[in-house]
Amino acid sequence: MTNQSCQEQFILLGFSDKPRLEHFLFVFVLILYLVTLVGNILIILVSRLDLCLHTPMYFFLTNLSFLDLCFTTSSIPQLLFNLRSLDKTISHTGCAMQLFMFLGLGGTECVLLAVMAYDRFTAICKPLHYSVIMHPQLCWKLVSVAWGVGLLNSLVMSPVTMKLPRCGKCKVKHFLCEMPALIKIACVDTVAVESTVFVLSVIIVLVPLSLILISYSYIAVAVLRIKSAAGRQKAFNTCGSHLTVVFLFYGNIVYMYMQPGNNSSQDQGKFLTLFYNLVTPVLNPVIYTLRNKDVQGALKRLVSRK
């Protein structure tokens, strides 16, 4: 390929070195993608249609479900097409859009999970002042900050990554236009770019994670002070759902972005990204539905109305 061809399209190698695996992955990914769509749309509808769920917690959960819908849809349809076709290409514009959405939505989720932790901290540690503190205007501001951070992350890193010269190396050893994979095929010294990525990762990933851990340290102390066993159980169930999502999300993000790229195998990175990009959005509505009696009750009320 010539330098000019890289300005027109990239080749996503994905799992093309394992043709038998591609057939299995197509069925697996398609099923999980459909479940993701149904599960997250259901969470959004239930949270909006049931008046009992018009609370800050479910407002944030609705945003998380919408974010997951956008996140999977930004890359999974392209993956399904590549798995069933001999054509593994993606246009330069399509690659740039995919990278922009991946960075933006990933950054948004980091901050949104920290916002949800703050909501749980306020509900458990300051229950008498909860409705005053978490008023609708503050909830909208916090969500706006989360989406704003994600947008800023994309605006900074997407142009820098896409403008790297590649000297005709347009074969991306991944199933999507992910930043580390695109940086690896650059034909210039990328130390400055990788340093910028690391600094932004510390700000966007570790700062919200630190806030989450601080919030839950206070929550743990407050929960242990609750004398009622039923009260402690309810608090643990609510926080347990959020902590499970945090563990699944941050476990993959920290592994992929907070270590030198050469330390992890390419196959391992692809499967981790697939888990982070597909399996986690599938599990989010399941976790919140199975562990949350409020959502279960709302579902029953909506079904009974029908």
Image: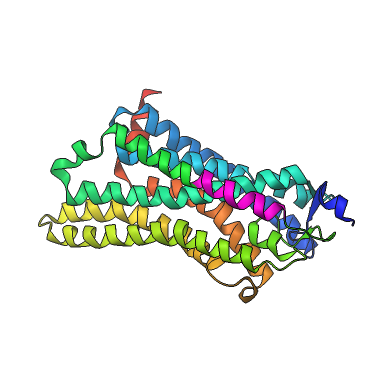
Q: Position of residue 154 (x, y in %)?
A: 58, 48
- Quarter of the image for residue 225 reads bottom left
Residue situated furthest right in the rendering: 2
Specify how the rendered protein is coloured: rainbow
Count all numbered tags in the image, as a single digit.
0
Q: Is residue 61 above or below residue 222?
A: above
In the displayed structure, 175 sits above or below 264; it is above
**295 left or right of 158?**
left
Q: Nearer the viewer, residue 66 or 118?
A: 118
The spot of residue 210 in percent (x, y) is 36, 62
Of the pair 34 and 167, the residue shown nearer to us: 167
Q: Position of residue 35 (x, y in %)?
A: 55, 44
**Between residues 124 and 85, which one lies in front from this camera angle?**
124
At which x and y percent is residue 150?
50, 46
**Start and end of the magenta stretch?**
150-163
Q: Is residue 196 magenta?
A: no
Q: Residue at x 84, y 49 (%)?
A: 87
Question: Which of the 4 quarters of the picture holds residue 138?
Answer: top left
Tell me the residue at 32%/41% (across/down). Answer: 57
Question: Which residue does the image show at 36% across and 41% down from the upper left?
Answer: 142
Q: Give the quadrant of residue 264.
A: bottom right
